[in-house]
Amino acid sequence: MSRHVFFCCTLVIALILVSAETTFGWGGPTHSALTKKTFDDPVVSPLLGGIDQSTIENYIGEPPDPWQDGQWPNVEGRAYIPGIASPNGLDWDSLGETTRLKYMMHNVADVCVPIGHSPACYNPGGYSHTVNEAILEAQVSTWTSYPSVAGTCNYTHNRNGHSFSFTGTFNEIIDTYYDAIRDNMTWFKSTKHFWGHYPEDNSDAGWNGTKLALMLQRAAIVDYMLAKEHIEMEPYKYPQGSAGGNISFDYSDSYDPDCVCWFSNGTYSHVHGIHPQGIQYFLFDFDGDVPSGGDWEYTSYDDVTNYSVNDLIAMGLPTNQWTKFYVAACDNEGNWYSVEDYMYLSTGGAPEPASLSLLAVGALALIRRRR
């Protein structure tokens, strides 16, 4: 082989390797652009107070290899939220807030690369060719504009017209995203991502993947930020009951902030009461001794709990007066939050209405514990 031929071959290989390395995972500039667009979303931006947005938006590096392994299981399992175990054993809790968000936003965008990291590649078809992927990502990195998802949670594939609505809880959005990728897997895989081959398909694949990335990033960052807030309880329900009957404890208005339902217009609302992705159960301390190290007497897996008044009286609770007790809600991440409330166990008539007013203006003691 002549020196010139060897030089040319070496140059071509070097260019391919450099291209693959610098543009891998959408490329740094694209990751930065996607993060900034997500952070500017009108639904997301109100939740970002107190975090260093510019540092995260300007991050164009690649997370260390271990933090990019198993990206889809980590996104699907919400491993980036403190207190949740990572499927591949990575200790996300050890990362600082800024670093965690850098890696999180990078991973969420990565799994939306249609021909590379997405769930579509977790199939017999295998992982797509690195160079092919790098070419797509290099093209995406040159864009001056990106798809807009503000005000909508609907996705329609540019080429085949398949439509998906990203509505419901975060888990349901994850499922919808998975179905959207799987439904278009053949189209993504059959596209030839080499120079000069089907440039329109190449562009469409990148555009669709980018739109999916923005939708998933928005849902993920909202989920992350809301998971930092404590459970919202509804105190002062003033449950009342008479001897021989039941007393009803109704805390169905309580909710776990990160348990939300997304709507097709791009907004969301909190899901109240017991939910698989929110509040799991309620704890009751009827004799009010939890603050001094006592036990919770009763666990309820219902929004409304009926309890025998006679059983409470048999526990030694006083009658014909307002008695303080504590109720706590526990969520799917192992956090719990409690408030004090008052109940009235009657052996005769109903309490005086004035008693309720006095309690309502009293100080509310809160007990908060997060893992």
Image: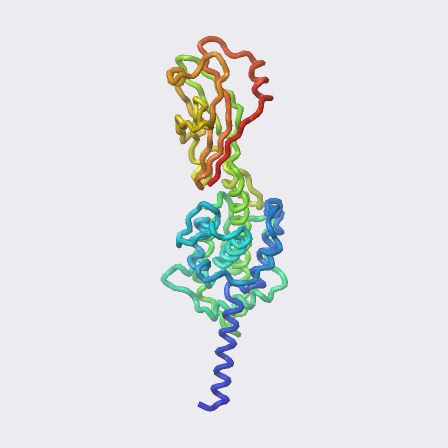
* Image-based side of 356 in relation to 118, left or right: right
Vertical side of 263 occupied by 182: above or below: below
| Displayed quadrant of residue 296 | top left
* Image-based side of 317 in relation to 227, left or right: left
Q: How many marks?
A: 0
In percent of width and height, residue 99 lies at 53, 55
* Image-based side of 143 in relation to 168, left or right: right
In percent of width and height, residue 55 lies at 60, 56
Q: Is residue 205 visible?
A: no
Vertical side of 149 occupied by 354: above or below: above
Query: Residue farthest to the left?
Result: 124
Name the residue located 50 percent from the left edge and 34 percent from the top edge.
Answer: 368
Name the residue located 62 percent from the left edge and 51 percent from the top edge.
Answer: 40
Nearer to me, 238 or 176: 238
In percent of width and height, residue 233 lies at 52, 31
Nearer to me, 124 or 160: 124
Name the residue located 45 percent from the left edge and 45 percent from the top edge.
Answer: 83
Quadrant showing the N terminus? bottom left
